[in-house]
Image (tube, rainbow, N blue to C red):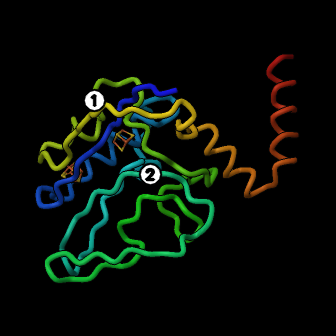
């Protein structure tokens, strides 16, 4: 059975990004616990990659978690210069530290600032390098992507084993009930 789903996109205009990093500040602050209590960019779901020698800023927002390193890599050529294979990848993956929560190591993924009318990084980007776009698509009912909790649990299961995760949830549930 088909249903409609809103696809949210952030279009990135690299030519307009000046590297101010306001997007990192507001994203990490919005996702801090409690909300707005700190602004550590390492907790941001958007990071601005800067190549100092080549002087280019590229904002990248965190995409799906990848369990294993991918077999295929992308190479980017911008203004005739070649960039590292993993430099602009959106995935949180085992081969690098980008998009991992610094304390727990859990993967970070952009949630389009759930609950807000518009992504906050877009609102805070005064250079208009980030443009928000919504479009409606038809999908099969079972095509929904796993949510953040499922992604986090999968990552923990890969790190510690499913049994340990299930035991911990059972323990936690007892503690919360008592
Ligand atoms: S807020 Fe805009 S201009 Fe500043 S770093 Fe982020 S994308 Fe670039
Ligand atoms: S849309 Fe929200 S969660 Fe996603 S990168 Fe921007 S500020 Fe962070």
Residue 70 lies in quadrant: bottom right
Q: Which mark is residue 118?
A: 1
Q: In the image, is 178 to the left or to the right of 125?
A: right
Answer with mark 2 or mark 1, whichever residue precedes in sequence.
2
Name the residue nearer the viewer: 34 or 93: 93
Q: Quadrant of residue 85?
A: bottom left
Of residues 38 and 86, the one nearer the viewer is 86
Residue 49 rendering spot, x and y as whole percentages: 31, 65
Quarter holding residue 89: bottom left
Number of callouts: 2
Relative to 53, is 48 above or below? above
Q: Which residue is rendered at x = 73% and y = 57% of the image?
A: 158
The crowd level at tag 2 (other Cα within 10 Å; few <14, some 14-19, many 20+) is some
Is residue 71 depicted above or below 172 in this figure?
A: below
Pinpoint residue 43: horizontal percent, then vertical percent.
47, 48
- Residue 108 at what x, y percent from top left? 51, 48
Using the numbered discs, state the Cα–Cα distance from disc 2 to disc 1 in whole angstroms.
Answer: 18 Å
Q: Kindly identify the residue that appears in the image at 45 percent across and 34 percent down.
A: 139
48 vs 113, left or right, is left
Q: Residue at (55%, 63%) from the top-left corner?
A: 93
- Does the numbered disc 2 mark a residue whose Cβ is under 8 Å from ligand 2? no
Disc 2, SS: loop
**Looking at the rendered structure, which numbered label has been put on residue 63?**
2
């Amino acid at each position: 059975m088909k249903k409609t789903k809103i696809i949210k996109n952030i279009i990135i205009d690299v030519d307009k990004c000046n590297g101010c990093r306001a997007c990192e500040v507001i994203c990490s602050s919005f996702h801090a616990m409690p909300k707005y209590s700190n602004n550590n960019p390492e907790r941001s779901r958007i990071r601005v990659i800067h190549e100092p020698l080549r002087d280019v800023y590229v904002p990248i927002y965190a995409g799906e978690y990848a369990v294993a390193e991918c077999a295929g890599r992308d190479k980017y050529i911008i203004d005739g210069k070649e960039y590292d294979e993993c430099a602009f990848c959106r995935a949180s993956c085992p081969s690098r530290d980008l998009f991992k929560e610094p304390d727990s190591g859990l993967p970070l993924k952009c949630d389009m600032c759930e609950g807000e009318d518009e992504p906050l990084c877009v609102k805070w980007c005064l250079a208009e390098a980030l443009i928000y776009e919504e479009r409606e698509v038809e999908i099969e009912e079972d095509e929904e992507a796993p949510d953040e909790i499922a992604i986090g649990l999968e990552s923990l299961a890969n790190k510690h084993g499913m049994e340990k995760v299930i035991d911990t949830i059972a323990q936690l549930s007892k503690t919360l009930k008592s």
